Image (cartoon, rainbow, N blue to C red):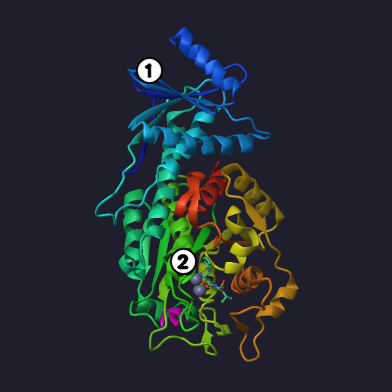
């Protein structure tokens, strides 16, 4: 059962309460006893961040508003406080909390966000020893925040949960076709349209990149088109989101090693999952924007008919590509989706992909790697949104010289760059298939974590959902 986020204009009685207070002059509830008030003052003086009081009829958690240099870092510190608070809440087996704020800011939203995201678990395959979190309900009780805002936040956090669930689902239970079915179900639930193109249709569209990657597979590829078109969108030309949907990446004939490589490649559809999450949040929140999501999906494996290093393939747009490494498969199916996107005459196209280990090596799990040709204004706005939601991005260049990295002796392009600048040569490859403003996000470092990292958790993070949703939201208002 996912966590429920609710709104209440009137603080309840006898429910477990989280109160955000200022360190300098904490505004404490009036009914604290002298001893309690003294204890709280002592704790504040000792710089304790969260002070728990058991008041017998209910628990009271005082969260001291973290000191921070900027508004953005204050918000992030509150999300992190939500993660720390959850540890106490779990130990106390609390089912419902009400979050109120005495600092006169919008702190409750950020604390609740951190609490909610930290409360995520993926336990569907535990037949015993499942440890469900006791926390089921988070109520924001703050008259400075509207019910609509809480509702919107709930939908965005559900979208992150959906993206995490899709990524955590193992390939044994998620072929390309099963993945597409999930996207169709999401569309039904949220209210966006879906169309799933099957193998025959993909063949007739001559999507040579997607088909080549699929050659070694037992399962057919799919190409899912999601569309959110409200009645009066503010944009004439749609925004298009493309997500890499490699449901499992063995590397193909250029086989990956197992430890810390192939063993987590069920996550290679995290870009597609993020796109699906964004579509869900847009539709649920009825944003007045026309947005299309495209997901080319297949697994990549070395079956008898598998494509091989040295092959030349013809892409959806007619260009030829010499395949020199079958593990550089993401760019092949993304390229087909990017040239397909042209038919929508898009205002702007984003693609999200766990594309290169090089991106992960360059910035680790701390940021998304972004590059593109959409211009500085869009890139700056994305960076700003990235700071606000703490999904920060680092821009890499797409200088002309990088084109040399992907020149083939016998075809128009090769799918492999040099030993250096691997994230960029992959981006440069994609650029060859774009003819509109476009930004590529390489989320290889952030999509899936091998250790717990605060409210991002362990395993799938749902990276990209909050960034892209909030960027688009700003365009809608
Ligand atoms: N799916 C991988 C990239 C990846 C690596 C994602 C680590 C998440 C974590 C991608 O398909 C891949 O294998 N890329 C190769 C490209 C290389 C052969 C040019 C890589 O990064 O090694
Ligand atoms: Zn690969
Ligand atoms: Zn891959």
Lateral position of residue 318 relative to residue 100, left or right: right
The quarter of the image holding the C terminus is: top right
11 versus 324 height, above or below: above
Point out which mark residue 46 bears: none
Q: CA distance from mark 2 to mark 1?
A: 48 Å
Point out which mark residue 268 bears: 2
Callout 1 secondary element: loop
Closer mark to the observer between disc 2 and disc 1: 1
Q: Is mark 2 within 8 Å of ligand 3?
A: yes
Say which residue appears at 35% left-offset and 52% top-offset: 122
Say which residue appears at 65% left-offset and 80% top-offset: 406
**Residue under numbered circle 1:** 55
Lateral position of residue 123 relative to residue 118, left or right: left
Asked if residue 288 can be seen in this view, the reply is: no
| Magenta residue span | 211-215
Q: Is residue 344 magenta?
A: no
**Between discs 2 and 1, the one toward the N terminus:** 1
Number of marks drawn: 2
Residue lying at the far top of the rendered structure: 34
9 versus 284 height, above or below: above
Asked if residue 62 can be seen in this view, the reply is: yes
Say which residue appears at 49% left-offset and 54% top-offset: 451
Q: Is residue 214 magenta?
A: yes
**Res 5 → quadrant:** top left
Residue 464 is situated, as x and y percent measured from the top left of the image, at: 52, 53
Residue 211 is situated, as x and y percent measured from the top left of the image, at: 43, 80
Callout 2 secondary element: helix
| Contact flag, marks 2 and 1 (Cβ < 8 Å) | no
Neighbour tally class for label 2: few under 14, some 14-19, many 20 plus, Cα within 10 Å: many
Residue 41 is situated, as x and y percent measured from the top left of the image, at: 55, 16
């Amino acid at each position: 059962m996912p966590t429920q986020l609710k709104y209440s204009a009137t603080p309840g009685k006898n429910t477990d309460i989280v109160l955000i207070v200022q360190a300098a002059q904490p505004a404490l509830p009036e009914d604290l006893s002298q001893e309690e008030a003294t204890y709280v003052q002592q704790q504040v003086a000792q710089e304790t961040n969260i002070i728990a009081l058991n008041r017998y009829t209910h628990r009271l958690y005082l969260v001291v508003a973290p000191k921070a240099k900027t508004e953005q870092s204050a918000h992030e510190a509150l999300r992190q406080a939500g993660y720390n608070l959850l540890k106490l809440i779990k130990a106390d087996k609390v089912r419902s909390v009400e979050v109120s704020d005495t600092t006169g800011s919008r702190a409750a939203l950020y604390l609740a966000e951190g609490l909610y995201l930290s409360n995520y678990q993926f336990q569907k395959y535990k037949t015993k020893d499942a440890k469900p979190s006791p926390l089921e309900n988070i109520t924001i009780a703050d008259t400075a925040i509207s019910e609509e805002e809480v509702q919107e936040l709930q939908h965005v956090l559900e979208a992150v949960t959906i993206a995490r669930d899709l990524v955590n689902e193992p390939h044994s239970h998620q072929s390309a076709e099963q993945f597409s079915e999930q996207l169709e179900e999401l569309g039904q639930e949220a209210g966006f349209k879906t169309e799933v193109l099957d193998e025959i249709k993909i063949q007739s569209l001559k999507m040579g990149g997607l088909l080549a990657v699929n050659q070694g597979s037992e399962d057919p590829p799919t190409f899912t088109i999601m569309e959110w078109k409200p009645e009066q969108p503010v944009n004439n030309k749609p925004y298009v989101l493309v997500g890499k949907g490699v449901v499992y990446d063995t590397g193909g004939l250029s086989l990956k090693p197992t430890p810390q490589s192939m063993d987590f490649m069920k996550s290679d559809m995290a870009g597609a999952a993020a796109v699906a999450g964004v579509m869900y949040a847009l539709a649920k929140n009825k944003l007045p924007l026309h947005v299309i999501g495209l997901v080319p999906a297949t697994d990549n494996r070395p079956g008898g008919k598998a494509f091989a290093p040295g092959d030349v393939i013809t892409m959806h747009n007619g260009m030829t590509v010499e395949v020199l490494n079958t593990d550089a498969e993401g760019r092949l199916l993304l390229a087909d989706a990017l040239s397909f996107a042209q038919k929508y005459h898009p205002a702007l196209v984003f693609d999200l992909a766990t594309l290169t280990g090089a991106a992960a090596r360059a910035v680790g799990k701390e940021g998304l790697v972004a590059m593109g040709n959409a211009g500085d204004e869009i890139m700056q706005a994305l960076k700003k949104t990235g700071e606000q939601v703490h999904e920060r991005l680092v821009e890499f260049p797409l200088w002309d010289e990088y084109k040399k990295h992907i020149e083939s002796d016998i075809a128009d392009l090769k799918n492999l760059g040099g030993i250096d600048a691997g994230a960029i040569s992959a981006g440069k490859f994609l650029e060859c298939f774009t003819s509109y403003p476009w930004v590529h996000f390489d989320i290889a470092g952030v999509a899936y974590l091998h250790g717990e990292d605060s409210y991002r958790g362990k395993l799938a993070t749902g990276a990209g959902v909050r960034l892209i949703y909030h960027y688009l939201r700003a365009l809608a208002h």
